Amino acid sequence: MANPTVLRWGIISTGKIVGLFSFPLYRKFTSNLRQSAVFTKDLLIDPKTRNVDDVVHKVVAVGSRKVETAQEFIKTNAGGDSSIKAYGTYDEVYADPDVDAIYIGTPHTYHYINALDAIRAKKHVLCEKPVTSNVPELRSLLTAAETNGVFFMEAMWTRFQPLPQAVIKVLSSGELGAPVVVHADLSGDFDIKNIPKTHRILDPALGGGAILDLGPYPLVWAIMTLYENTLNELTPPSKITASILKTPLTGVDANTSFTLNFDKIGAQAVLSCSINAAAVEPGVTIRCEKGTIRVAAPIYCSKSFTVQYLSDGKVAREEKKEFEYIGHGMHFEADEVARCIRDGKKESALWGHGKSLVEMSVFDEVRKQGDYKLPAGVEQVV
Ligand SMILES: NC(=O)C1=CN([C@@H]2O[C@H](COP(=O)(O)OP(=O)(O)OC[C@H]3O[C@@H](n4cnc5c(N)ncnc54)[C@H](OP(=O)(O)O)[C@@H]3O)[C@@H](O)[C@H]2O)C=CC1
Ligand SMILES: O=C1OC[C@@H](O)[C@H](O)[C@H]1O
């Protein structure tokens, strides 16, 4: 076996580790989810633990708005590795010639400008979800990525995990017949009455609310099971219907439901997300002509699903599949980035630019129907 390809990462933003953790409900939902930290820790896991031997990851730089925070981050999340450079600006990471790819883990409404700066510095980019605040911002980034000849991907980590791949395999086998209705919900109790209104979940200037933060996950399940269905031929949903209930705390969406019609295959997705309620079980239900798949919560990195095969309307057989791996599950998307860059690709076949565009188009429409406008000037391109 040839030596594995090494991808050298620059991490943008450090994620707050303290403060909000004094809020019990918030801690319960997000304790292991400080985003840049979780991603970095996953990068540092030996890929062989997941049977990967063709790519490896190296963190070479961390950028924060304060150099001390970057230093602290390296100490806490990368074993104090003295070879990792700590920078007090993001620009220094973009300019570092040792960095191949940038991971962007800032709040939603900063993704556009951070990604644009990285792309202009000719770095490959993996940008957290939701990739931008709206479609025009995303189109602008895609043009910039093309002009600068770099790889660009939204960090839709769920798409690369083993469980969704296995669900897709069951659906593609045809044994369940065609999918008819997909229900998916991602909710979390963020303790919104007690957390500061400046937290990114509540602050409209940071794209607060359920749809942009949690919405990507029910939507990715609809995309994987319906949009990607071979007979759908990558046709975007023909109709989107949405309802938003805003919280009076800051006016962001607390509870959002949206349906997507896929006329070409006669199927519908019924999706929802909330920032003030616990997750439901199962998180995803895929109802097909001859059976049902139920995916256990949390739907962003589920570890088990069951398949019920129906015969004459009765359950003829039931199978449960479980998954285990070391790490949080973000290394799978990182492996994809490394392989794409190694192979000279500018986008991933599994989560390419087209799928992010479908996602952002749905969110733009949901926000429009629910009258959820981001404050003036927050969207950098409109
Ligand atoms: N894939 C997944 O499972 C998850 C993805 N996410 C995504 O990651 C992104 C970040 O989420 P999370 O880590 O919770 O976010 P935080 O609110 O914790 O912010 C992350 C970091 O962004 C930097 N930052 C830059 N500008 C600002 C600003 N104006 N206000 C606050 N912070 C700023 C700060 O780092 P510094 O001080 O170092 O510059 C901050 O610590 C979101 O877009 C979210 O959707 C979040 C959780 C899970
Ligand atoms: O991506 C995410 O997944 C889990 C949630 O806790 C978080 O808010 C969100 O950004």
Image: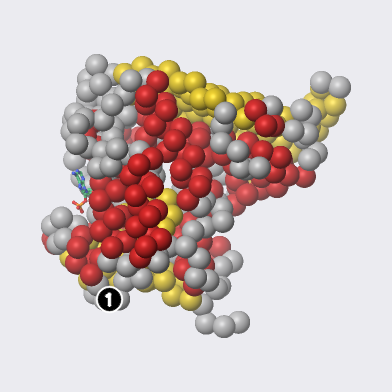
Q: Residue furthest right?
A: 312
Of the 4 image quadrants, the one containing the N terminus is: bottom right
Q: Using residue 168 as the reference point, say whether residue 156 is left or right of it.
A: left
The residue shown at (41%, 32%) is: 363
- Please give the count of numbered marks on the rendered protein: 1
Is residue 13 visible from the viewing direction of this image? yes
Left or right: 330 in relation to 85: right
Give me the residue at 33% from left, 20% from top.
Answer: 371
What kind of residue is marked 1? Pro
Residue 254 x, y percent position in the rendering: 34, 22
Residue 29: x and y in percent read 37, 35
Determine the image quadrant of residue 174: top right
On screen, 270 above or below 146? above
Q: Is residue 372 above or below residue 362?
A: above
Residue 345 lies, in percent from the top left, at: 50, 66
Q: Residue at x 26, y 54 (%)?
A: 114
Q: Quadrant of residue 184?
A: top right
In this rendering, does residue 280 appear at all?
no
Residue found 72% across the figure and 30% down from its top: 288
Q: Which residue is mark 1?
A: 97
When asked about the image quadrant of residue 152, the answer is bottom left
Q: Position of residue 123 (x, y in %)?
A: 33, 66
